[in-house]
Amino acid sequence: MHFKDITGYEIERKLIIKIKQQQNITLLTSHFAVDLITEHQLKRPKSKEKLTCYGAYVFNQKNQEIVTYNAKTTLLATGGIGQVYRNTTNPIIATGDGIAMAYRAKAQVSHMEFIQFHPTALAHQFSHGRSFLISEAVRGLGAILKNEQGEAFMHKYDARKELASRDIVSRAIDNELKISGADFVYLDCTAISKKDFKQNFPNIYAQCIEIGIDLSKQMIPVTPAAHYLCGGIDVDTNGCTSVQHLYACGECAHTGLHGANRLASNSLLEALVYAHRCFIATKKDIETIKHKISIPDWDGKNTFETKEQILITHNRKELQSLMSDYVGIIRTHERLLRASKRLNVLFEETEDLYQKSKLSTQLFELRNMISTSYLIVEQSMKRVENKGGFYNSDLI
């Protein structure tokens, strides 16, 4: 299943149209989920069985208030974690929020070390915090990767050349960049007819034209970018997490479908198939839930409005540089250890600010990004075998 080169956008567009037609769905814009409500927030002793989710605290960005949502079932569909890296194809909201909330709620989270880097993101700075993806299918149509001298290099790394898997191509480009010191390599599409390119990749063609690249004469500057998380919140085949009445689907969930290195377009399985399975399971779950509990309002006393926004923006940029330099495509024991130590400092600084400051979406996101990064680093340090999207050069 695909629609030109914008399948995800087309699914989302039609889904939003359908949602607006439903009388029993309320779509809350300008709201940000802060934390899940479990026994921890209720200050109740842990059950002999597994923990239970009772809903979530949600930040209304318009009136700057936290709203308490009591729910029989809660579904996390919060997307990926790409924004913890400097270069990512993910939207600016992909800050690992659902994973971080689930982790704080004591849900099981695993395989966070398996992060897929897309080898060919457009090396152009956009204001919206994401890199534009140049599809692998472009290489399938005949495009060739070249270094800054204009020399093809993939034959040095794999017999399949440009058609090797994403992890191999990403590592090859990363190595070429380290050798040359350049910020990007090139994707040469000049051998592909303009007609064929426009027909197969109209969105990519339009984007290149917009920034002044004539594909019939010029090469596209590309660089690897964080693209997809293969791990996440552990779920069963119905999307159930280890916390009762809490479900997850999409990229924030670890379904096991992708193993250590997702195949292109298989994200539709987690987004569509598991969303449907979650619906079926929650429909049955709701019919059996009878608990009625009193949930305390959010405690926002003794906080102040910080006038030092730089404390948040600086730590976010530092985190992205830290993860890109130490926990990127190729990792080492030393880099992971350094990342772990610095993350502890960032966590303490941010948590202190969080406990004292007034509500801020930017601060919520930074807190989630740090928790997500911690999970990536810790689970990377425990892995003793290179596989799929994980590569530690000390394990060769």
Image: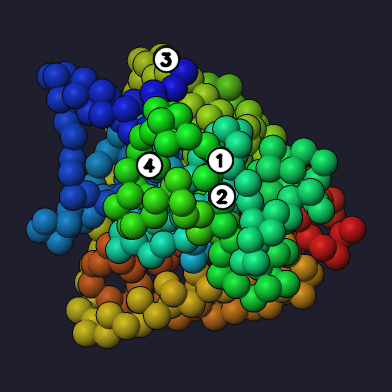
**In contact (CB < 8 Å): disc 2 and disc 3:** no
Look at mark 1 in the image and give the residue it sits on.
Answer: 191
From the top left corner, tell me how far across and down residue 162 is, in percent: 68, 42
- Kindly report the distance in space between the C-alpha atoms of the residues bearing marks 3 and 1: 49 Å
Look at mark 2 in the image and give the residue it sits on.
Answer: 188
Disc 2 marks a residue whose amino acid type is Asp
Q: Secondary structure at mark 4?
A: helix
From the top left corner, tell me how far across and down residue 88 is, in percent: 48, 56
Residue drawn where x is 32% and y is 27% of the image: 10
Q: Nearer the viewer, mark 4 or mark 3?
A: 4
Look at mark 4 in the image and give the residue it sits on.
Answer: 205
- Kindly report the distance in space between the C-alpha atoms of the residues bearing marks 1 and 4: 15 Å
Residue drawn where x is 87% and y is 59% of the image: 395
Look at mark 3 in the image and give the residue it sits on.
Answer: 280
Q: Residues within 10 Å of mark 4 (few under 14, many from 20)?
A: some
- Kindly report the distance in space between the C-alpha atoms of the residues bearing marks 4 and 3: 41 Å
Q: Residues within 10 Å of mark 1 (few under 14, many from 20)?
A: few
Disc 1 marks a residue whose amino acid type is Ala
- Say which label, 2 or 3, has the lower sequence index: 2
- Say which label, 1 or 4, has the lower sequence index: 1
Disc 3 marks a residue whose amino acid type is Ile
